[in-house]
Image: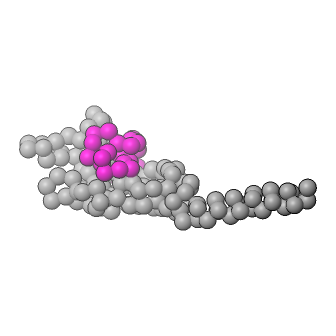
Amino acid sequence: MKSVSILIFLSVMLTVAFLTMAFADGSGAGTGDLVITVEGFENSEGVARIALVNSKENFSEETPFKGYECKIVHNRAIKTLSLPYGEYAVKVFHDENRNGELDKRLFGIPAEAYGFSNDARGTVGPPEYEKAAFKLEVPKKEITITIK
């Protein structure tokens, strides 16, 4: 009976040790706060529309992983999100007229200021996902995006 108890105890301890090692590299469960600061607004009219994406596929689509509307105060917008660890990218634009879309001029050129995480820019059109992507793998990560 005593040897069975010892075996059960050792089995439980080995399981705990294995799980601890499996999650220690950050690939397991974990969440962190992502603090997004958006700067470069010419005024505080309207709202900042923030799109959080978690894959190359939804970076190029109209539907993000998550979307947020953020108030602009003193030409700056700040949004804090609690997210699972992983890879993300952020797209943002200044929706001055609050119509819910990025207004465009002739030839599809944006009429409202916009930006991406890592301050990534494309030569013609948006940047590639890889240029805007970053990893959230710490309890708190702060990023700043300057819109233009």
| Horizontal and vertical percent position of residue 139 | 55, 60
| Horizontal and vertical percent position of residue 135 | 42, 61
Rendered view: 114 above or below 121: above
**Residue lying at 16% horizontally and 42% vertically, measured from the top left:** 104
Q: Nearer the viewer, residue 40 or 60?
A: 60
**Residue lying at 24% horizontally and 41% vertically, measured from the top left:** 102
- Which quadrant would the C terminus be assigned to in this image? bottom left
| Horizontal and vertical percent position of residue 59 | 30, 48
Q: Nearer the viewer, residue 9 or 46?
A: 9
Observer able to see residue 35: no
**Residue lying at 18% horizontally and 46% vertically, measured from the top left:** 110
Q: How many marks?
A: 0
**Residue lying at 12% horizontally and 44% vertically, measured from the top left:** 108
Report the span colored magenta.
47-75
| Horizontal and vertical percent position of residue 48 | 35, 45
Residue 28 quadrant: bottom right
- Which quadrant would the N terminus be assigned to in this image? bottom right
Of all residues, the one furthest to the top in this rendering is: 99
Residue 14 quadrant: bottom right
| Left or right: where 3 falls relative to 77 | right
Q: Nearer the viewer, residue 120 or 43?
A: 120
Of all residues, the one furthest to the right in this rendering is: 1
Image color mode = one colour
Within the magenta stretch, is there residue 91? no
Within the magenta stretch, is there residue 55? yes
Observer able to see residue 13: yes
